[in-house]
Image (tube, coloured by chain):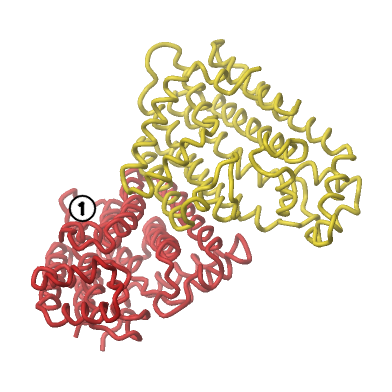
Chain colours: A red, B yellow
Amino acid sequence: MTTVSDILQPVELDLENLLVDLRSLIGAGHPILQAAAEHLFSAGGKRLRPGIVLLISRSLTPQGDLPVKHLKLAQITEMIHTASLVHDDVVDEAATRRGVATVHSKFDPRIAVLAGDFLFAQASWHLANLENLQVVKLLSRVIMDLADGEIKQGLFRYDSCQSFSTYLEKSYCKTASLIANSSKAIGVLSEVSDSNLDMLYLFGKKLGLAFQVVDDILDFTGSDQQLGKPSASDLASGYLTAPVLYALEEKTILSEFIERKFSNEGDLDKALELVRSSNAIDRSRQLAEKFASESRHAIDWLPESSSKEALLGLSQFVLGRLY
Amino acid sequence: MTTVSDILQPVELDLENLLVDLRSLIGAGHPILQAAAEHLFSAGGKRLRPGIVLLISRSLTPQGDLPVKHLKLAQITEMIHTASLVHDDVVDEAATRRGVATVHSKFDPRIAVLAGDFLFAQASWHLANLENLQVVKLLSRVIMDLADGEIKQGLFRYDSCQSFSTYLEKSYCKTASLIANSSKAIGVLSEVSDSNLDMLYLFGKKLGLAFQVVDDILDFTGSDQQLGKPSASDLASGYLTAPVLYALEEKTILSEFIERKFSNEGDLDKALELVRSSNAIDRSRQLAEKFASESRHAIDWLPESSSKEALLGLSQFVLGRLY
C-alpha cells in the first residue's frame, strides 16, 4: 500500500533536514518549550504541507539543490500549521491529536499558548526575511484565515441551519488556505507566470478541500484507532461537516438532535445512524473526488517529473483513505 | 496635574478614530470576541504606543491630514500590543490588568487565545499591506521579541543569580522593542535619513526602558489602587526587576527568600523590607532618569512643534509617576 512517505520520496531528504532545523529552532529558547517541541515534532505529523511546497519547487527546479528561500518557505508553512494546531487544541480543549496527548493537556495551556505564539512569531520573522512582499501577503493572509476559520467554526457549532457554503468557507480557512497560498507563494519564488500562479493556488485550494472532506467523512466511517480520536467526535462537539449537512437535506429530524446538543440519551447514536443510512456519505465522497480531480487538472501544465507525479498522487492517496 | 490625554492632545482626534476602527474590526467576527473587544478597549489603556507613532508622524508632517499608512501603522502597533497583553495574561494567569478583569478570567482562556490570535493575524495582514518590506521586518521582529521576552521572563523566575543585563534584555523584548521599532517604522514611512531612523529607534528603546523601570519601581512603592494590581505582585510571582537586582547587591540574604520562593511565612514582607531599606529604589530611579534623558536627546533633531514637545513630555510624565 502506498504511504505518505512513498509519495514524498522525491523531496524526502530536504524534508528531513527541514524538520531537524525546526526542532532545534524551537528547542533553543526554553527547556519547557524544548519538551513541547520534541513532543510536537515526534508525534510524526504527515508533513504534507511542507512536502507539497517542496514538490512544487522541485518540479519547477528539476536539477541541483533547491534554493534556500524555497526551503525556508516550506519550513514557514510547517511553523504556521503547527502553531495553529497547538492553539486550536487549546481552543477546542482537545486532549489528543493523532492519538497523542496535545501540548496543552500534556504540559499546560499556558505553555501551549507560548509555544504557538513563538512559532507564529518565528514564522512572521522568517517570512519577512524572504524579502518578497507578495509572499509576505499570501502567507499573512493564511494566518488571518486560520484565525477566522477557528472563529467561524465556533460560531456555527450546533447550528443546523448553516449553509453548505458556510461549511466550505470554514474548510477553506482552516485547511485549504494554507495549502493554496503556500503553493502560490512557491510559484512566486519560482517566478512562474501570473496565470500559472492562479493554477497553483487552485491546485492547493482544491487539494485542501479534498483533504478536509475526506477527514470529515472518516469522522463517520473510520475507527477510533484510524482517526487517533474517538469517531464521530466532530459531530459530538457540534461541528457540522459535509456528511451531516447532506444528511440534513434528507432527514430533517436530525436537526432536532443537533439543536438540543445531543442532550437526551441515545441522541448521538441516532444521529449517527441517520447520517450513515442516508446518501450523505456517498455524496460527500463524490464531492471529495470532484475537488481532487479539479486539483489534479490545475497542474496539467507542470513539466513531467517524479515530483509532478507525487503531486498528482497526493489526492489519490487521500481518496484512498476512504476505501 | 498633567495627564496622558493632555500629552497626546496634538494627535487626539486621530487616536480616537483609530480606536473606533479597532473596536469595530475585532467585533465584526464573533459575538464573544465582540464582548472581549468591548471589554479590552473600554478598559481604557493609555494608548501610549499608537500615540507615540502618531506624534512622530505629526512632527514630521506638520500640515494637513496624516497619510493613511501612518494611521494604519499606529493601529497595527496597538493591535500587536493588545494581542500580546491578552496572551501574556493567559500565560501569567493574571486575574486583573489595570484593575479590570482580564479577558481570560472574565470570559475563558480559550476566548483569550482566539482573541489574541485574531489580533496578531490582523496585524500581520495589515502590516503586509503597508507594502513596505522594511516596515514588515521591523514589526515582525517585535512580534518575535514579545514571544522571546515572555519566554525569558518565565525562564528567569525566582533566579536570583540572573544578571542585570538579562533583566534589561527581557525589558527590551517585552516593552521597548515595540516602541523602538514602531518609532523607526514611522520614520521609514516618513522617509527620514538612515541616521535619523537610528535615532528614532534609540528614542523608542530608551523611552520603553524608562517606562519599564518606572513600572518596576512602582511595584514596590505604589499602592494597590494606583497599580491596578496588588503591590509587589511582580516580586511575589518571582519576576525579579531592577529594584530587587540592585538590592541583592547590598543584601545578599534576600536571595534566600527568593530561592525558596517566599515559602516561609513572612518571607515576602521581609524581602520587601530589604528592598525598601536599601538604595535600590534610588538607584532604579536614577536608571529610569538616565534612560528618559537619553530618549529625549535622541530626538533633538526633530523640528520644533507641539508634537515634539509632547514626545519630550512623555518621559517627564512617566518619571512624574514616581513622585
Residue A272, percent from left and from top: 22, 79
Question: Is disc 1 surrounded by few (<14), some (14 to 19) or many (20+) residues within 10 Å?
Answer: many
Depth order, front residue of A270/B112: A270
Residue A159, percent from left and from top: 23, 61
User: Label 1's element?
Assistant: helix
For the C terminus of chain B, the quadrant is: top right
Say if B166 sits above or below B319 in the image.
below
For the N terminus of chain B, the quadrant is: top right
Residue holding disc 1: A197
Q: How many marks?
A: 1
Q: Quadrant of residue B63?
A: top left
Q: Residue at x 35, y 86 (%)?
A: A225
Residue A53, percent from left and from top: 31, 63
- The answer to whether B104 appears left or right of A318 in the picture is right
Return the chain for callout 1.
A
In this view, which residue lies farthest toward the front? Answer: A264
Say if B255 sits above or below B205 in the image.
below
Q: Give, as a three-letter code, the residue at label 1.
A: Leu
Q: Residue at x 61, y 28 (%)?
A: B203
Residue B87, percent from left and from top: 52, 51
Q: Quadrant of residue B46?
A: top right
- The answer to whether B163 appears left or right of B137 in the picture is right
Depth order, front residue of A254/B88: A254
